[in-house]
Image (spheres, grey):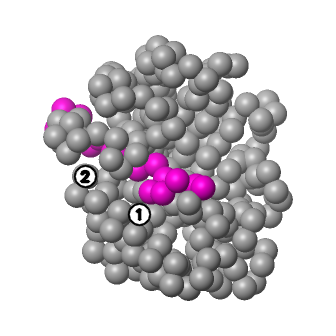
Amino acid sequence: MLKLKEDFSLAQAKYGLSLSWSGLDSNALSECLGLPGIEAAGIQVDSLSADALSKLRSERHGFVLHAGRLLDQSVSENILYAPQKMREAFAEKISALLMLAKTNGFACASLDIGLEQSLADSKLRQTALELFRRMIPALLKSGVKLALPCRVPSLSRESYPGELALFIKDCMVPGLKVSLELHPHELQQGFDPAPLIKGLEFDIASVILMYNADNGTLVKAHIEPWVTMLLRYGFKGPYLACPKSGAKSRLPAECISLAKLLSGIRKNG
């Protein structure tokens, strides 16, 4: 029987910012990601120049880069309904983007093809299996993980995380993982995180904590239950705070507050 780790501290995990949806320019991005205490970043694969990314990694030992969606969701979410030739071209495009991600130093990238709506249909499920298997050569060559987003809590059905876990197992595609997209303000105080992701515990590549910075902020209580649970399964992050705002001009100040919060968690455990 698998023995879970029991000795853990919040300081063992790696924390950072996810600014893939921020709309910030390259200068603002660099400033936010250069804040003290930021150890990881989620950005678009082409958001910063190769020189800027190299500088960021050289200044922060162990800095982890994760790419946001390789393609816009409006482009990718209906690919399973497309003709085979279009699906083949799609797989080639994703393969090329995985190689770009490798060149730019990314460890992981995300892709949303609408699985939450598709896995209940056996034909679409098989189409998805075949699609991801076409990406195996690029995944092996690049070494970049490909993360499928899983919203928590699910908007469709509680069984979806388990369905996604079984899909990943059936795919037998190396490097195919999950990015948990948490919406902490939708979860009740004192919630138990375990049932919300049952089956996915060993398939996680990143945890993104998403919230509307116009209506609230992120606090330690939103992060701690997830880190405490997932450390038991050996997952140390990255945990990426992802603020969204109708006024992107307020995001740099929000990132400063987040950096202080994450530094405090890292320091004090």
Q: From the top left corner, tell me how far across and down residue 84 is, in percent.
A: 56, 85
Q: Residue at x 80, y 64 (%)?
A: 159
Instruction: Give the tally of numbered discs.
Output: 2
**Nearer-the-camera pick, 87 or 10:** 87
Q: Is residue 65 magenta?
A: yes
The kind of secondary structure element at disc 2 is loop
Neighbourhood count class around disc 1 (C-alpha, 10 Å): few under 14, some 14–19, many 20 upward: many
First to last magenta residue range: 58-74
Of 147 and 203, which appears nearest the observer? 147
N-term mark: 2 or 1: 2
Residue 221 visible here: yes
Q: Residue at x 36, y 29 (%)?
A: 25
Q: Quadrant of residue 168?
A: bottom right
Q: Secondary structure at mark 1?
A: strand
Which image quadrant: the N terminus?
bottom right
Q: Mark 2 and mark 1: span between their CA atoms?
A: 14 Å
Q: Are marks 2 and 1 in contact (CB under 8 Å)?
A: no
Instruction: Give the residue drawn at x 34%, y 41%.
Output: 47
Determine whether 139 is above or below 56 in the image.
below
* Left or right of residue 80, residue 241 in this image: left
Mark 2 vs mark 1, foreground winner is: 2
118 in magenta:
no
| Along the line of sight, the residue nearer the viewer: 218 or 231 | 218
Q: Which residue is mark 1?
A: 145
Q: Amino acid at mark 1?
A: Lys
| Horizontal side, residue 27 vs residue 244: left or right | left
Q: Position of residue 33 (x, y in %)?
A: 34, 29
Q: Which residue is mark 2?
A: 104
Where is residue 156 drawn, in percent x and y?
A: 82, 56
161 versus 130 height, above or below: above
Q: What is the three-letter code of the residue carrying label 2?
A: Asn
